[in-house]
Image: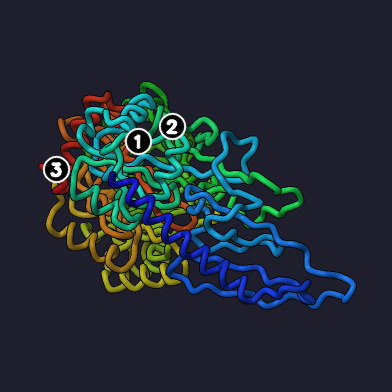
Amino acid sequence: MAYNDAIMAANVRYCLLALLIALTLAGCSPTAPAATAQPAPVIAPSSTPISTPDVGPTLPLSQTAAPQRTLHIADAALALFQNGLDLPPDLRMAVPGQPADVWLVPVPDADAALSAWVYALVAPFPTVTDNIALPDLRAAWKGQPPAAFRGKPLLMSAGTLAAMQFLFGEPVDGAVQVLEPEALLDAAWNNLPAWAIVPFDALEPRWKVLSVAGQSPLHKDFDPAAYPLTVYFGLTGDRQGLPTAWITDTNRDPDKMTVLVMTGVTALARGTAERMDAEGVTYPAEKIGAWLRDADLAHISNEVSFYDDCPAPERRDPRFCSNPAYIGLLDAVGTDIVELTGNHLLDWGAPPFLDTLEVYRQRGWGVYGGGANLDAARAPLLVEDHGNRLAFLGCNPAGPDTDWATEDTPGTTPCDYDWLTAEVQRLKAAGYLVVVTFQHIEVCTLEPHLSQKADFQKPASAGAAIVSGSQAHCPQALALGPGQFIHYGLGNLFFDQMDMFASRVMLDRHVIYNGQHISTELLTAQLEDRAQPRPMTSKERQKLLEDVFRASGWLP
């Protein structure tokens, strides 16, 4: 059985490491009571040299070193110490095969736990399935996976299998395939459809996180105690008086998580403005507003300036402006960040645009991709949230040139790719996760224009973690790579186009954890009444995802 072989191999590696440490300590230990305190051993991953701290202070002659207790760490708990193990002075690793005084093992519930380790059920990103019922996951453990993954074993590492066995018992032969952690992603992508279980801290954007029983560790309302893939660890045996700070308490700390929702085109004009006048300013957000409000950072690419003398909505007028009262819609969705790369921002001249900048400033919203002059337009928006540092840059290669900022006039940021590349590199080197957005050529096709592909790749290659198209009136394809997430176009958010493709809406829900972009959830909606997106039905969502994944080159 593949998983048993892998577990045996992992155990051999663990035992050899522990034996080496134990023998080293035994060789250095005196047979009589010591005059100095024993140094605390440090166990690091096999790729990191093992080091021993300096010996502690000399004890008075009337004292002897406290006797050390021995520790055994269960295979399932080894994941807690990926960055090394720093034991307290009165604790040392037990010799493999010998009795231990203290055991770090899975425990049944949170009451007896010192650590809660969260695992995620994942699949390659171009997977349409969103949720797996818990009975279906249990059935897969018995060799009967759900239809979406029929005939496919669950992929996982040996350590993850040891943890899952505590939850689900021994899997039947063939239900699980054990691989080295670094081999899981390629194995899954090379054998679509596929699925796997990985620790939460091993997530990266090429995985899609599947909800289990309707719960996802990516969501803010996540409850580890109610989630079927949380494993608790605690100490058993002679643990009285033993410090526990050396045990990592979790691999999913909500204080390290930022949710960023990115959107496509917002233009509060024409038919959308007419419906807002008739139904109320917040009408467009009534069915999906929570998607934006629940985010830590809600991004809006508002392409139209507010103008006190804006005429009543007129569909035939090629110049766009918005009634200043419409700002109430952006208030209602919890806007935090406004992108200013839109090509209609100066339709009524510079004064409305400058007045709009002041409206945003008064609300404390961050802006980027445009400004009162070229220097302001190029300035990155720097945001810190839950310990994460993000930098936003945007530019407009499509024009018109009358829309671009100059040294002395306001407008959007023209694209200078040498500047953009250097700025991405500078911000990344300064410790920021960089997000770049474009107001690019508008093509209402799933496949991006060739110039889009070339231009979006430039900041991605320079180190931008997320590159997103704000210009597209239809959802477009994606491209993924190590450390890269590119979405060529999300389609409209609040705009009135209702043809077959333009009425489909996407929002990207990015999750940033501990400084890294770890996952993206594609939110999908259908535009109705020229103004109001609603969540898609299951059938509509499946069709849109399949179309986008096919255009991305991932599905036949």
Task: Tell me residue 73's x, y (percent).
Answer: 55, 52
Q: Residues within 10 Å of mark 3 (few under 14, many from 20)?
A: few
Q: Which mark is residue 279?
A: none
For residue 533, above or below residue 19: above
Marks 2 & 1, CB-CB < 8 Å contact: no
**SS for tag 1?**
loop
Residue at x 30%, y 44% (from the top left corner) = 155
Q: Amino acid at mark 3?
A: Leu
- Of tags 2 and 1, which is closer to the observer? 1
| Earlier sequence position, callout 1 versus callout 3 | 1
Task: State the residue in front, 144 or 484.
Answer: 144
Q: Residue 298, position in %: x, y?
A: 44, 44
Disc 2 and disc 1: Cα gap in Å? 23 Å
In the image, farthest residue toward the left: 556
Using the rendered view, name the quadrant where residue 367 is placed.
bottom left
Say left or right for 400 vs 14.
left
Look at label 1 and name its amino acid. Answer: Pro
Residue plotted at (62% across, 41% down): 113
Position of 529 relative to 250 (above/below)? above
Q: Secondary structure at mark 3?
A: loop
Q: Callout 2 environment at 10 Å: few (<14), some (14 to 19), or many (20+)?
A: many
Instruction: Identify residue for label 2.
Output: 215
Which SS class for mark 2? loop
Mark closer to the chain start, 2 or 1: 1
Residue beneath disc 1? 171
Residue type at numbered disc 2: Gln
Q: Are marks 2 and 3 in contact (CB under 8 Å)?
A: no
Choose between 173 and 358: the one closer to the eye: 173
Quarter holding the N terminus is: top left
Mark 3, residue position:
555
Name the residue nearer the viewer: 182 or 52: 52
| Res 51 quadrant in image | bottom right
